[in-house]
Image (spheres, grey):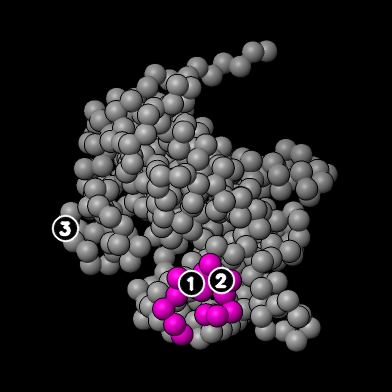
Amino acid sequence: MSETFKIPPRAPFASDPLLSRGRLFKQAPSATRTAFQRDRDRVIHCTAFRRLKHKTQVFVAHADDYYRTRLTHSLEVAQIARSIARVLGLDEDLAETLALAHDLGHPPFGHAGEDVLDEAMRNYDGFDHNAQTLRIVTQMEHVYPDFDGLNLTWETLEGVVKHNGPMCRSASDRDGLPWAFTHFEGWEWLEPHTYAGPEAQVAALADDIAYNNHDIDDGLRAGIITIEQLMELPLVGDTFEEVLSAHPGLSSNRVIREAVRRLIGKWVNDLLDESNRRIKANNPQSADEVRMMSAPLIGFSDEMMININALRKFLLEKMYRHYTVNRTRTKARRAVRELFDTFLNEPDLLNDELNAQTDGPRGKATARIVCDYIAGMTDTFAMEEHKRLLSMDSYL
């Protein structure tokens, strides 16, 4: 039997690559790709994207080959974002690009690493992974001969920094903006006081769908949570019950895979239904109208948010704060802090290229160089660098 899905027409409020607001540095258009396809390819080929292979969210990268890394997570987010964008008539390539780029600024060891860097940088303008992503794609990637960064389109840069919503109250308001954003030349160009375009909103919620449901998968396989515990949750418990009732005697591996697959489908369908309701109510005629709305155009229903919050509370209590995860997090925090303090106090331990950019022990420039260096590390490299620097068992 042939597939019956018919691709919807392009929505009037979809971002149009032919109408992009452009790039920081002018370049001739590609003869074979749209502006957003070109952005996607630049993200895929950049160094920071490759490093996601050995960066994790909950489990340390070396713990097991099965658990998701930020690279596999980003690919999963991209698949979900493309699917949602296609049904809503949005630009799939821009949604995919933003999904692939959304984790580029994360340091090693997930949120534990980010918390330590933010604390360590408190007197040096702080650290924020979204701001670090902007810093990476506009400054830290050294690919092209004529400029730093990837020279991505305005729509991609905007989506990277604003996918969680407006960053400030007005166009000229700097209060609360991360250092990397306010030090980005032309920061007002990205209109931080508005919502992001519809594709960025899709990518942000695709991230929620992917990590919440896939954390169920990883947590079950790690033995940290059980199906019996999940049965107490609304929606999640019902979904596992559906699978167990429909397929008695099914292996636990297949039960988990089928239940998570169904859960992702339920989240996606709810998002599509609610978003279509908002689209009908607001009738936006351009991506800019979406940005200027007083609330997001793309979202889950109130009922689904109740289910989502129940799952998040469960995962926080039973998985993210599990003693085995706490032990790993403690070691990770200590390693990142010791790396930061050592390099900050002794910048001559950095390689020659980085050391040449510092301004002496505990200097402001030194702190940012050290922060960038550590933030770019993978889990495995951070562990090895810590050993090389602070263990007498290593001499290199």
Is 348 within the magenta? Answer: yes
Answer yes or no: is residue 164 visible. yes
- Residue 261 picture quarter: top right
Q: Of helix, strand and loop, which one carries label 2?
A: helix
Q: Quadrant of residue 88?
A: top left
In this rendering, the answer to whether 179 lies above or below 104 is below
Region in magenta: 347-361
Q: Residue at x 39, y 38 (%)?
A: 199
Q: Is residue 140 left or right of residue 20?
A: right
- Point out residue 335 in the picture as x, y percentages from the top left corner: 62, 78
Which residue is identified by label 2?
A: 352
The local secondary structure at tag 1 comes to loop
Question: Mark 3 is on which residue type?
Answer: Ser
**Image disc number at residue 267:** none
Q: Residue 292 lies in magenta, yes or no?
A: no
Pointer 3 or 2: first along the chain: 3
Q: Nearer the viewer, residue 331 or 281?
A: 331
Answer whether labels 1 and 3 touch (C-beta < 8 Å).
no
* Mark 2 and mark 1 residues within 8 Å of each other at the beta carbon: yes
Residue 106 percent coordinates (x, y): 51, 61
Between the C-alphas of marks 2 and 1, the distance is 6 Å
Residue 100, compared with residue 28, is above or below; it is below
Q: Amino acid at mark 2?
A: Asp
Q: Number of labelled discs? A: 3
